[in-house]
Image (spheres, rainbow, N blue to C red):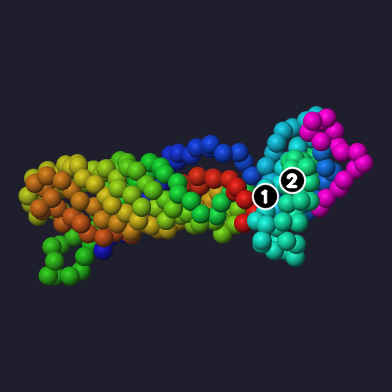
Amino acid sequence: MRILVAIFFLTSFTSFSQEKSYKFKVGQVLEQFDISTSSTVNPAVRRLIKEQYYFNVESIISGDYIIRVLEFESAIDYYGVLGSNLNTELYMDSNNQPIYFKVPVAVWNQFAEEVFENVGVTFGVMNIPIKLRFANSNPNHRKRLLELDANVNLGLSVAPYWKRSNDQIFFTPVGITITQVVANPVNTLDYLQTTENRSGFSAFLGLIYQKDGYQIGVLFGADWATGNVSEYWVYQGKPWLGVGIGVGLFAPNNKPIKSQN
């Protein structure tokens, strides 16, 4: 077996085609807002927007945020209140008109936070430039020595993820990278007479844990050299273990929540 100590770099690709969703860290009592007159309704109507309720921003007027709570499933009980009743109170009035609320900017800055779906997939280009290979001890196999490689390895990685919370995420990257392997007389059983970089590819999967943007993870995979040297390279198809620590290796493709599920 060989162990890979790697520095990981990833350029992640994300797209946002949907409006963002938010919730409050602590429930807030807000005034209902008439968006047609750009003022709160008269007489005043105040509602509690619990910290479990999701909402979108409709507009920003005079620095304050005008929000609309996402629709509730009518037949579901939300913390002791039926969804149909919450829709009448927070989502759509008796005239079938949207209900809006005003969030003062000070409240927004202190208590509002963006929320996303808990599962998804992100994509990126991964580079694994440093590999440490360990010797084998089985006399019945081709001899492998301790060896350190430092080459460019670029390839596409797909990483499904699961959010335990807004600041804790698990990624399970899977990918194939184009690589260069160091082939020399020792690790090709004297097939080569000099040390050369030969083309190849790596396939891998792993698990990465993220907390507050910092990430630590392990990768498992194998490398294959191409061409004639592949028949003699002693690390051909051998499993490896990779360990990496960094910041921003993967970024979730943040898809906003669209309903009160």
Q: Is residue 131 visible?
A: yes
- Closer to the chain start, of discs 2 and 1, is 1
Residue 92 shows which numbered tag? 2
As drawn, is 145 to the left or to the right of 34?
A: left
Helix, strand or loop for the magenta stretch, by majority? loop
Q: Residue at x 32, y 42 (%)?
A: 155
- The answer to whether 199 is drawn above or below residue 47 in the figure is above
Q: Position of residue 52 (x, y in %)?
A: 70, 56
Q: In which quadrant of the rendered view does residue 256 lie?
A: top right
Q: In the current view of this chain or complex, which residue is farthest to the right?
A: 43
Q: Mark 2 or mark 1: which is in front?
A: 2
Who is closer to the viewer here, 205 or 149?
A: 205
Q: Which residues are magenta?
A: 34-48
Q: The C terminus lies in which quarter of the figure?
A: bottom right
Q: Mark 1 sits on what residue?
A: 71
Q: Secondary structure at mark 1?
A: loop
Q: Are marks 2 and 1 in contact (CB under 8 Å)?
A: yes
Tell me if mark 2 has few (under 14), some (14-19) or many (20+) residues whose alpha carbon lies within 10 angstroms of its own: some
Amino acid type, label 1: Glu
Q: Position of residue 251 (x, y in %)?
A: 50, 45
Q: Position of residue 216 (x, y in %)?
A: 47, 55
Q: Residue at x 69, y 63 (%)?
A: 77
- The answer to whether 68 is drawn above or below residue 85 in the figure is above
Q: In the current view of this chain or complex, which residue is farthest to the front?
A: 95
**Separation of marks 2 and 1 at Cα, in angstroms:** 9 Å
